[in-house]
Amino acid sequence: MKTPSDNLEILKSNETKLPIHLQNKLILLIGDSYERNLVRDICELTGREARAATLNGTLFTNNQGYSGSTYVCTITKDSASFVLVSVFHVGVLDPMINAKKYPDHWQPDSPTDLPDRISWIPHMLKSLAKELYPALCPRLNDGITIDASACPNSTSIDKSAILAASIIQPPLWKNETSFWYPIPDMIVAQSSAWDLKTMKHSNEALSNWANAVSRFLISPVLEQFGSVVKDSFEFNHDVVQWHPRLFLRTLPMVQPFMQDKTFESKRLHKLNNLVRSGVFFDLERKRFGVLDWDSLTTGLNDWYIDGFHPGPEPNKAYLQMLLARLEGLHHRKIKPVVFIC
């Protein structure tokens, strides 16, 4: 098996080209402040600044977004780009309560319910492409008919103006005859930190959470992206090995003094063990893999000043895992698999 590269060092280096496994690749993170921090951190590590945008694909002037805005990091070398995008949500159990309780985290011109937010993502990715990652825009040799709408000019809005704006719903891309948007090469979707704030302390509550994740997160992601973000399969001694491009992740432990009733270690372990258990694989026919951020960073003991969010070292470790998984998917030698029902 090929040893994964030190992809963060590659992105930070003065090399004039990206390695082929990072060229014109896009990773989509559907999550919360953990994902937002990852996007900001990878940009900061590579000497760049993450850009803030609304969910309908409008850039913020002066880059002054909300805590819950979309953030994009683009790393371009020799006309090829690697792109990391975060989309914020406040859980699957009771998002409206969380949105109202924490208005500084919420962008007032976007939908609250997660399935609606997921349905807006393709339009957002398309609307930001020309400004933030033009290398991913279609070219004539892509076999796509080019017109003015394929990669439109981006628009901007001031943060203060958005408070008075009504919800501007993007076009329903599924109803358009041809709708190009940058297809993610990997998607990581999760719902944990915000749901712990509203989840009761019982096994029944944990089961209800799992059902809600399947209904409001996994199913909408599969409906929106399942036909274009393809899993990879290969034969190994006549056994089919499955290599997903859609992932859930575990929640890293918070600093000990933060382990109150909401985030005490037993609750976090139960939730993470449920994610690891494979219950979501059975529900969705093994379309989702697991990225175990918790196990990866156990013992690093590095948090931001709030004691809640993982610090630079755990974030770098997780980013390396993301990039290594992307590299592994690129190097798979795929053979066609025929399923007989």
Image (tube, rainbow, N blue to C red):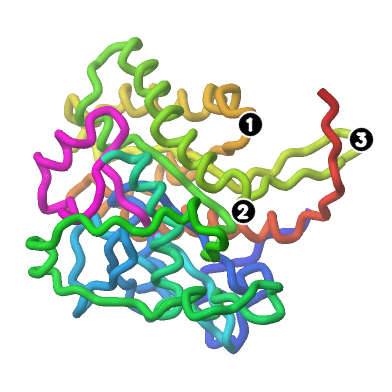
Residue corresponding to mark 3: 238
Q: Secondary structure at mark 1?
A: loop
What amino acid is at disc 2?
A: Arg
Mark on residue 47?
none
- Residue 132 lies, in percent from the top left, at 41, 77
Q: Which residues are magenta?
A: 86-112
Q: Residue 146 or 225: which is nearer the viewer?
A: 146
Category of crowding for the residue at label 2, using alpha-carbon neighbours closer than 10 angstroms: few (below 14), some (14–19), many (at least 20): some
Q: Earlier in the sequence, mark 1 or mark 3?
A: 3
* Amino acid type of the residue that numbered disc 3 sits on in the rendered structure: Asp
| Residue that mark 1 sits on | 286
Q: Is residue 200 above or below residue 62?
A: above
Q: Quadrant of residue 102?
A: top left
Task: Report crowding for label 1: few under 14, some 14 to 19, many 20 or more residues within 10 A (C-alpha).
Answer: some
Residue 1, percent across and down? 79, 53
Q: If you read the primary sequence from the N terminus, does the residue marked by circle 2 or circle 3 appear first? A: 3
